[in-house]
């Protein structure tokens, strides 16, 4: 018997037409490759074809990597600790109150 | 021209990029095997490691380099490769140690920064290679499709697709061929495919099946296979060229296979007494 792991299901070949994953990395060329019209970006100095003086190249410096901003005035650790303790005590008191009410309700149901 | 015993080899300067966005197929192993063939023939070879894992770097005996290819990719600077070369620690006896542009894990942070470049950063490596004076340049790409791989393909004269005989690796060949085609269309000079190198050819029926599939799908583009041998991994682990392992079982056979690949890929002429 001939070995054929594709006997039940033939592996699909990528379609020769259409966008390829690498198109996304080729920036402006991506739209062209996908068959779309490339629209000139007039917001950048490179697209300005007039004789106006172009702004210095330093304005084209790449933006900094996105990072999660830290809060301007972070709450002090002591305040956070106190809030946590108060919440814990509140939760305990609430649980005890519920237990007390539950037992009282059970006693009220019992026939005398 | 480089002297190698009684035979001289004439090699045209060419940049060969080893690529496959599928990982684990042995791009670095084949890169080091080809570099070993150049070593044995005393051909002036430069290996550029653009994989942040830096396996080609350590395979060539460079540890904790003070500079790396990251410096060349940080900004567009023609010829910057020249100041980033180190000499491999491969033994100078019996061969010519290649030059290395090493990689470090810091290179991993470069790729997202390249993505933010407003005018694109596809050809930083090509610009950095301007004026390179080596007879052959071998670029070892990372196992993913990102801007490092794209830079490797923009800098190349030829792309060598490395794969292994398996289902997923076979899928990867189709995908990378498409990637090469797209990049070739955007270059002033088309990018040619040097071939498909089938690495780690085992003795299983599954390996034979997928090797036949590759040859059926891609015809003469598929180069002679490099067999799975322990000697190849031992050479890499020892930071030695496979040709330097001597009579260790499997080493001469593996060296011969890499020599065959090298002859088929690299535009080389051998002539006596030149």
Image (cartoon, coloured by chain):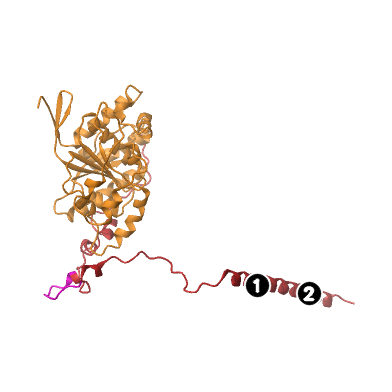
Q: Residues within 10 Å of mark 1 (few under 14, many from 20)?
A: few
Quarter of the figure with the N terminus of chain B: top left
List x then y, in percent, for residue B223.
24, 36
In-image side of B71 versus A66 (left or right): left
- Is residue A63 part of the magenta span, yes or no? no
Task: Give SS at disc 1.
Answer: helix
Task: Give SS at disc 2.
Answer: helix
- Tell me the quarter of the picture where residue B57 sits: top left
Chain under label 1?
Answer: A
In-image side of A111 versus B82 (left or right): right
Residue at image coords 28%, 39%: B31
- Residue B178 visible in this rendered orientation of the protein: no
User: How many numbered marks are there?
Assistant: 2
List x then y, in percent, for residue B267.
15, 37
Instruction: Name the disc covering residue A106, or none.
Output: none
Question: Vertically, is B272 above or below B158?
Answer: above
List x then y, in percent, for residue B132.
18, 45
Quarter of the figure with the C terminus of chain B: top left
Mark in the foreground, 2 or 1: 1
Residue at image coords 31%, 52%: B145
Gap in angstroms between the C-alphas marked 2 and 1: 20 Å
**Residue under label 1:** A87
Bounds of the magenta segment: A46-55
Q: Residue furthest right?
A: A112
Q: Which chain is orange?
A: B
Q: Mainly helix, strand or loop, the magenta region?
A: loop
**Residue under label 2:** A100
Q: Which chain is red?
A: A
């Amino acid at each position: 018997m001939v070995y054929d792991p594709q006997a039940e299901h033939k592996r699909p070949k990528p379609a020769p037409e259409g966008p390829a994953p690498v198109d996304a990395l080729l920036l402006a060329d991506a739209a062209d490759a996908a068959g779309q019209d490339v629209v000139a970006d007039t917001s950048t100095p490179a697209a300005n074809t007039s004789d106006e003086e172009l702004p210095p190249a330093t304005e084209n410096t790449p933006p900094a990597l996105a990072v999660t901003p830290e809060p301007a005035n972070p709450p002090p650790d002591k305040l956070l600790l106190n809030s946590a303790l108060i919440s814990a005590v509140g939760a305990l008191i609430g649980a005890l109150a519920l237990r007390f009410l539950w037992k009282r309700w059970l006693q009220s149901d019992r026939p005398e | 021209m480089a002297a190698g015993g009684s035979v001289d080899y004439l090699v045209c300067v060419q940049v060969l990029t080893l690529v496959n966005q599928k990982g684990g197929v042995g791009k670095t192993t084949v890169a080091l095997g080809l570099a070993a063939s150049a070593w044995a023939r005393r051909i002036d070879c430069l290996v550029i490691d653009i994989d942040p894992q830096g396996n080609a770097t350590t395979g060539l005996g460079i540890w904790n380099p003070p500079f790396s290819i990251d410096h060349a990719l940080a900004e567009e600077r023609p010829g910057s490769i020249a100041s980033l070369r180190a000499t491999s620690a491969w033994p100078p006896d019996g061969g010519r140690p290649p030059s290395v542009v090493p990689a470090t894990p810091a290179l991993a942070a470069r790729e997202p920064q390249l993505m933010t470049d407003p005018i694109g950063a596809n050809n930083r490596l090509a610009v950095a290679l301007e004026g390179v004076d080596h007879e052959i340049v071998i670029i070892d790409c990372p196992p993913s499709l990102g801007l490092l791989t794209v830079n490797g393909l923009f800098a190349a004269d030829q792309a060598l697709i490395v794969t292994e005989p398996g289902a997923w690796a076979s899928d990867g060949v189709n995908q990378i061929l498409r990637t090469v085609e797209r990049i070739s269309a955007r270059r002033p000079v088309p990018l040619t495919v040097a071939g498909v190198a089938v690495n780690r050819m085992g003795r299983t029926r599954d390996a034979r099946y997928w090797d036949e599939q590759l040859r059926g799908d891609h015809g003469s583009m598929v180069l002679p296979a490099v067999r799975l041998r322990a000697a190849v991994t031992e050479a890499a682990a020892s930071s030695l060229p496979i040709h330097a392992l001597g009579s260790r079982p499997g080493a001469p056979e593996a060296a011969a296979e890499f020599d065959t690949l090298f002859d088929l890929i690299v535009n080389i002429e051998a002539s006596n007494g030149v």
